[in-house]
Image: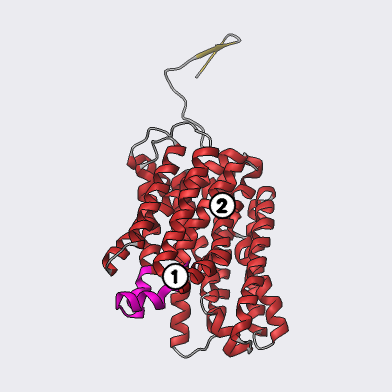
Amino acid sequence: MPVAVYVLGMAIFSMGTTEMMLSGLLPSLTAHLSISLPTAGLLISGFAIGVAIGGPLLTSLLVRLEPKLVLLMLLGLFVLGQSLGAVAPTYSVLMVSRVIAAAAMGAFFGRAASVVVGLAGSQRRGRALAVLVGGLTVSSVIGLPIATLVGQHFGWRASFWMVSVLAVLSFVGVLAWVPRQERGPQVSLRSGLSIFRSGRLWATLAANALALAAFLGTFSYITPLLTDVTGFSLSTVPILQVLYGVGCIAGIAVGGRFADRRPDLSLFVALACSVAVLAFFALVVHHQIATVVAFLAFGFVAFGSNPAMTSRAMAQAADSPLAASANASAFNVGVAAGPWLGGLAIGAGYGLVAPIWIGVALAAASLVLNVVSLAVTRRTSRVPAKPAAPDPERVVVTTGRIEE
């Protein structure tokens, strides 16, 4: 795999860390800025909205520029947003900084996905996308706890500066190792957005959002679940989270390889396994040893399907960076929707296990939507093209006959 692929994965790691780290910094943010916890939580929602809306718009505006230049511009914009957040005197300025960084991240992911597919070639596109998506995975497993630790000892602003430094290092890496490529097609904004006329693309994006909602809805409430339901001590939870992270990384690696060989089959198997593992998790959550096994398997299936999901979305739009950016938006819709649905269930009195059962339903819906989409696609491809009407004014002379 080209070094440039790993450089772009590191850039995604830094961006993913800033998306995740707010959950560990909320207490210090509320105290320093004199805001309530729900108000501080809106900073997470603001970031998700920035990725979902700002990412595709920024991608479409920059589609005509040379890819490496776009990557450098977006990294620079991200550093600007992060640095503004680090010195933000008020909540409003901090929210603006989050939206700026989020839009840069959404657009960067889209352009980076297109670049790594071109660098790795069609035979290794799944593995290349796995490295990119793996940057997000590692940010939740490693970046989040490190940022939280830095924030606890040096203040929340230090965590923002830490991510800014990582992004600057990524900027240098892109400058050094990512080769220049052909300039993007000279198309108008309307032409660039034409990929969204495809119903199959929208079905894929919806299925991807459902899958992420299933996983994040479960993971968001995992700490109280493990302590209050399963009976683990609070000090044991970080160890279990490391185990979950090992499963995530293994899932990304295996999912990337199978996405190259049988993309559709690997996606269906991963989603079917997700339904089974989540159901198993919900059924054995009162037993500690079985829960450890289920938690490891959950990490594996949660991210094993991501390379295939990203690859499928891009393939339906001729590897357009706008499609990859839209896929990142779909992921963030799932990130926002899953915890919200799980919270509604807990608030309604259904208990801490309810988010897992909601995850089962969401993963099953994603599987069904993908199967239906593929069936419609194959049925459409088998329909023979209607022959062109003969031109009455055209005559062809053959073997002494005149035929229309």
Circle 1 packing at 10 Å, graded few (<14), some (14-19), many (20+), is few
Question: For residue 276: magenta?
Answer: no
- Residue drawn where x is 35% and y is 77% of the image: 30
Measured along the vertical axis of the image, is residue 89 above or below residue 404? Answer: below
Q: Is 354 left, or right, of 121 in this rendering?
A: left
Question: For residue 41: magenta?
Answer: yes
Q: x, y percentage for residue 270? A: 65, 63
Distance between mark 1 and mark 2 Cα atoms: 30 Å
Q: What SS does tag 1 mark?
A: helix
Q: Is 357 left, or right, of 346 in this rendering?
A: right
Name which of mark 1 and mark 2 comes first in the sequence.
Answer: 2
- Residue drawn where x is 49% and y is 62% of the image: 17
Measured along the vertical axis of the image, is residue 370 above or below residue 321? Answer: below
**Residue range highlighted in magenta:** 21-43
Within the image, what quadrant is residue 84 found in? bottom left
Q: Is 100 left, or right, of 175 in this rendering?
A: left
Q: Which residue extends farthest front?
A: 154
Count the numbered circles shown.
2
Camera-side mark, 1 or 2: 1
Quadrant (top left/top right/bottom left/bottom right) for the N terminus: top right
Measured along the vertical axis of the image, is residue 386 above or below residue 58? Answer: above
> What amino acid is found at the position of numbered circle 1 in the picture?
Phe
Q: x, y percentage for residue 264? A: 63, 54
Main SS of the magenta part reads: helix
- Residue drawn where x is 58% and y is 50% of the image: 129
Front residue of 237/404: it is 237
Can I make out residue 272 in this image?
no
Report the disc number at residue 269. none
Report the disc number at residue 154. 1
Residue labelled with disc 2: 132
